[in-house]
Amino acid sequence: MFGSISSLHRLSRGLRLRLTITYVVFFTVLLTFLGIFFRQYLSSLYDSQLQAILDEEWGAVRGYVRIENKGTKVNWYYDREEPEEALIVDRLRQTFLLTDQNGSVLYFSPKYEELGIESPKEIRDFLKRKDPVWITKKGADGQTYLVRQQMFIAEDDRPYFVAIGRSFQERQRIIEQFTRSYSIMLPLMIVTASLLGWFMAGRALSPINDVARTAHRITGSNLRIQIPPRGAHDELDKLIDAFNRMIERLDASFQQTKQFSTDVSHELRTPLTAIRGQLEVALLAAKTPEQYQDAILNALEDVERLSQTIRALLQLSLAESGQLALQKQPLDLTALIHNLMEQFYIPAESGRVELITELAPGVVVEADKVQIERLVSNLVSNAIKYTPEGGRVTVALEDHGRDAVLIVRDTGVGIPPDHLPHIFDRFYRVPTPGREKSPERGLGLGLSFVAWIVKEHRGHIDVQSKSGEGTTFLVRLPHGDLSDYERQANASYVTPSS
Ligand code: ADP
């Protein structure tokens, strides 16, 4: 018991761990991708910003650069008193190259020289097109520069080559900072997510553990335990509800089994006590052979009743445990009932009960002949048995499309409403004062059999009764998978209503 509880804990912990790991792996992958995406986004954002700055500076070139001396001298034309202008020109001149159309350098900044000045041929080739070209160059300090190169038409209407550049240093710094901060944050976030995941998985699984613990507490003697639902109406509440219902069903079946054992012992003990009494009296008091014979005959009657009970019980338990296989075949119900009725006319007559049959012709069902005979016999013999002199028993068979309907109606003693729900229980007999010891008293097993037979044929049984007025049993039996042709071919007997 303890072993299984601890293995249960291990199992739930395993599940909790698996859920947490799945969650953390998913979370980590998601965060890593998000980090890479933002890093990329940041860098492309910075690139376009750098391009915009260089575009702006290109505009400034037009404003501040003058080429004089027939295209041989570069002059920076701006107000030196104006700090803002001085700053712009300073910035511009930091990474700057200007050549004439033959590639002869007119102006260069030391920084641009460090990045490498293009050869005159390259410049001549380049000047064949007008659009700006963006390239990256690496400086001696290892820094990368974005360079904008474009043809520049000066005031003398001659083309020149201008290149301006800006370092990526800032971008690099920002991205490195982002990467650093993110790599510190990531493990922290993963640890927090793991703890949160572990906690949430524990919370989600705790009702399952409750169910498991309760299941372990359940034994045959405390089947009244119920797990309180949490009121969330979710899957777990459904599980708890299903579990509670299962316990209820188990409880009902346990109670039934207990009741059944009590009933069986009682049923077997009563005739045994009677036999013993009769034999003891005979042994002590009988004097003549006739008295002995009487005692033995009485004892034999009880023995017969005892073996009847045991036989019926055995059959019923075989039936209910599924060991009594049904032999279903197309069966002419009209003919079967008509023939069966023969054996009831004499008992009906001797009880002064009128027996009437109203059978629809050619009603065929797919059913087990022996069991259907047993069903009809049980209902009809009960009806005759519980109908006093002058009464009437009607056996009717009707065809209701998909079902055949058997109705056994009597004008007998009826069944009181509080006993009605139990008449299909094993050994249940409606107590009738004065008849407890009567030899006609049944075993209380007949209707249990009837109920089983109806269920096995996927049918339905209904009973209506009024004390002192009579009882009606209505049995619906589906025709089964029979085709119209099979039904007609098997309807061997057509009765006139009698
Ligand atoms: P039994 O062998 O006692 O007839 P059944 O299982 O056939 O057992 O029936 C159970 C009880 O139902 C009977 O004891 C009887 O009290 C009641 N019962 C069955 N059929 C009728 C009926 N047609 N009219 C009145 N009571 C009936």
Image: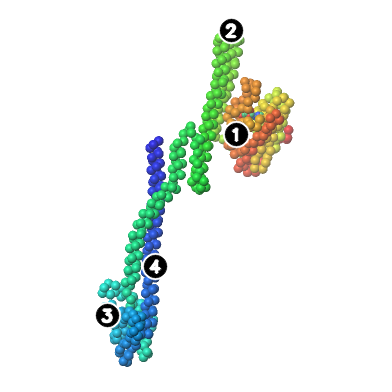
Q: Which mark is residue 363?
A: none
> In the structure shown, which secondary structural element does the residue marked by tag 4 occupy?
helix
Q: Is residue 278 above or below residue 10?
A: above
Label 2 packing within 10 angstroms: few (<14), some (14-19), many (20+)? few
**Which quadrant holds residue 453?**
top right
The one of 331 and 384 positioned closer to us in this rendering = 384
Q: Is residue 270 above or below residue 84?
A: above
* Place of residue 254 in the rendered image (x, y in percent of width and height, measured from the top left): 51, 32
Q: Which mark is residue 287?
A: 2
Q: Which mark is residue 41?
A: 4
Label 3 packing within 10 angstroms: few (<14), some (14-19), many (20+)? few
> In the structure shown, which secondary structural element does the residue marked by tag 2 occupy?
loop
- Mark nearest the camera among 4 and 2 is 4
Seen as rendered, the residue at the extreme front is 81
Q: CA distance from mark 1 to mark 4?
A: 76 Å
Seen as rendered, the residue at the extreme bottom is 70
* Place of residue 8 in the rendered image (x, y in percent of width and height, measured from the top left): 40, 41
Q: Is residue 291 above or below residue 473?
A: above
* Place of residue 86 in the rendered image (x, y in percent of width and height, measured from the top left): 33, 82
> In the structure shown, which secondary structural element does the residue marked by tag 3 occupy?
helix
Kind of residue at disc 3: Pro
| Mark before the other along the chain sequence, 1 or 2 | 2
Q: Are marks 1 and 2 in contact (CB under 8 Å)?
A: no
* Place of residue 165 in the rendered image (x, y in percent of width and height, measured from the top left): 33, 78
Residue at the spot of label 3: 110
Q: Which mark is residue 451?
A: 1
- Mark nearest the camera among 3 and 1 is 3
| Mark before the other along the chain sequence, 1 or 4 | 4
Q: Give the residue drawn at x 39%, y 41%.
A: 7
